[in-house]
Image (cartoon, rainbow, N blue to C red):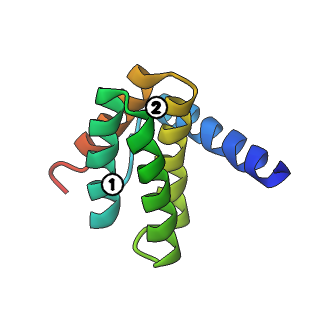
Amino acid sequence: MRNRIVLFSTMLLLLTLLPLSGCGYPAVSPKTYEISKALYSVCNQKSTERLETIEELIQSSLEKNEITEREAGWLNAIVASANEGSWETATQEARRLMEDQTGR
């Protein structure tokens, strides 16, 4: 449980600091982009049930090395935001992650 709290805190910190850095998200894997699209949809619809599915998808993708730890951290931070009820923030971050990939 302590590890989850530390992980959650770290992800929340990353999610908070990233927009302040002004540089946005770097290039991500195709799988991360795919998950971010699904996450955007889930957050836009405020679907708690589908959010659980996204969490499982992030974990399984990480275990299969389809996404990096760093990418999983960004995605999980967005999920955490949604889980706290900050649906608008989560939706905006998922959209930003996708938009930062255009032209790459």
- Secondary structure beneath label 2: helix
| On-image quarter of the C terminus | bottom left
Left or right: residue 35 versus residue 77 is left
The part of the image, by quadrant, that contains residue 46 is top left
Residue in the image at 64% along x and 36% along y? 13
Q: What is the three-letter code of the residue carrying label 1? A: Ile
Vertical placement of 14 versus 55: above or below?
above
Kindly report which numbered mark, 1 or 2, lies closer to the viewer in this rendering: 1
Q: Nearer the viewer, residue 31 or 24?
A: 31
Image spot of residue 69 (x, y percent) = 55, 64
Label at residue 35: 1
Are circles 1 and 2 on residues that touch, CB within 8 Å? no
Label at residue 79: none
Residue where numbered disc 2 is placed: 19
Residue at the far front: name it.
49
Q: Callout 2: 10 Å neighbours few (<14), some, many (20+)? A: few
Image spot of residue 10 (x, y percent) = 68, 44
Mark with earlier residue (1, 2): 2
Q: What is the three-letter code of the residue carrying label 2? A: Pro
Question: So how many labels did they put on this image?
Answer: 2
Distance between the alpha carbons at the discs numbered 1 and 2: 20 Å
Residue in the image at 44% along x and 69% along y? 61
Vertical placement of 79 versus 67: above or below?
above
Residue in the image at 26% along x and 38% along y? 41
